[in-house]
Amino acid sequence: MKTSYFAETALLAEGWCSDVRFDVEDGRFVRICAEAPAEDADAEVIRLAGPVLPGMPNLHSHAFQRLMAGLAEVCRNPADSFWSWRELMYGIVAKLSPEDVGVIARQLYIEMLKAGYTQVAEFHYLHHQPDGQAYSDPAETSQRILAAADSSGIGVTLLPVLYSHADFGGLPASSGQRRFIHTTEDYLALQYQLDSLLEAGSRHRLGSCFHSLRAVTPEQITQVLAQHSPEWPIHIHIAEQQKEVDACLGWSGKRPVQWLLDNVGLDSRWCLIHATHLDLSEVEGIARSGAVTGLCPSTEANLGDGIFPGTDYLQHQGRFGIGSDSHVSLSISEELKILEYSQRLRDQQRNRLYGVNNPVVGDFLYRSAAQGGARACGIEAGEIASGKRADFIVLDNSHPFIATAQPEQLINRWVFALNENPVLDVYVAGQQQVAAGRHPLEERARNDFAQVLKRLL
């Protein structure tokens, strides 16, 4: 069935346009007309209440970590770091049941939708029981993630993670990692099972995922990629911490991204999560390959990872998207703002991330992240264009900043001026999931989530 919409202002693939009518059929945009005549906004057309933007893909999520957001902000060690935070995370992991994972993910995905995210790449490595033994159904926790996505209405790119070792050189996993660990054979069997569960034409996708170079061996990477569907995205944590870079140099004589470039090869299917610590040759190599860099600015700041070399990367036309990762923030504007402001603090200059043909910082960042995120999630979305999946959001025109902004300044107002969330309505594959800022399951999901928090914490 075809549904028609009318927006006074919309961000199309070619830029901001006025009086836009667009039709949605089978979850995709099928006809888009800018400067549409007044009769196109008749009673049969749904008139949208504010400016319309493409939905934002969230290219990196560990859903269960939402449980611990805000709990690690107590200094118990003057040398507190990512590595001490990780030990706290392992303690949380030991307590979670599959049912808990599903409750946390449903609450998280509803919050994401309300923020304007329409697809999430779930980097999922909580596979086994607390003692490390497999569940009777190896896909038990993965299916909880899929069910949470189904009930919330978000699209999910499920990335079951291959995680086998504690560090470079195939070191045995620690007790805190035992719920994550797979052999290559068991991992490939899980992928096969999950692929059989996903229906053609659904909002959901599957991909391959390596936790990090330190958690797998070169032989495992080769074995998995030999069985990898050419349509699936490939994700990996890389170069997040300087300690990781130093360890990789000690193991191989090469920096992590350079090792990937030289020994595996990168292309547009790859998404390199964080990639914080790069030298110039690695920056150039990623950009040249067409891979997407998955930036998670709020988490990277929270963990003290470092500052991504964004200005150098964009000079080489590198692709990027954003993710909320550990979910200390579920704000699109905050991710984009931290990304830009970190560059300003490092360089002691203003307006660092922009395009040659688009000097408006917020506008450029949003468009780039939406397109890069869609590529990393393996979906045809990120733009309002014919043939793309009909993921779009409507901003609240009752706010003075939104109501009075010129179109090209709308996202700047949102990212750099608003303290509240202006997302009013959210559509995923043409289906409305958030209306007037509310999700139909939010009260039930919030109550269930609160019960999990009380019991576990």
Image (spheres, rainbow, N blue to C red):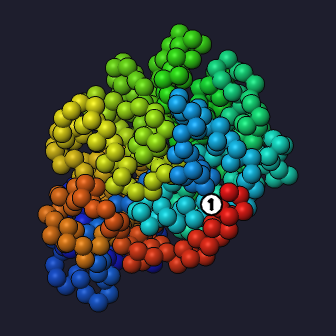
Measuring 64% from the left and 42% from the top, which residue is drawn there?
A: 88
Q: Which quadrant of the figure has residue 169?
A: top right
Measuring 36% from the left and 73% from the top, which residue is drawn there?
A: 424
Q: Which residue is mark 1?
A: 104
Q: Which quadrant of the figure has residue 187?
A: top right
Residue that lies at the very extreme toward the bottom in this rendered image: 43
Closer-to-camera residue (16/171) = 171
Measuring 52% from the left and 78% from the top, which residue is drawn there?
A: 440
Q: Residue 335 appears at what percent x and percent y?
A: 37, 49
Q: Which quadrant of the figure has residue 297?
A: top left
Whether residue 21 is visible here, answered yes or no, is no
Closer-to-camera residue (174/206) = 174
Q: Residue 323 appears at what percent x and percent y?
A: 45, 48
In the picture, which quadrant includes the N terminus?
bottom left
Q: Is residue 98 left or right of residue 275?
A: right
In the picture, which quadrant includes the C terminus?
bottom right
Under mark 1, the amino acid is Ile
Q: Is residue 326 above or below residue 424?
A: above
Measuring 46% from the left and 65% from the top, which residue is drawn there?
A: 113
Closer-to-camera residue (275/373) = 275
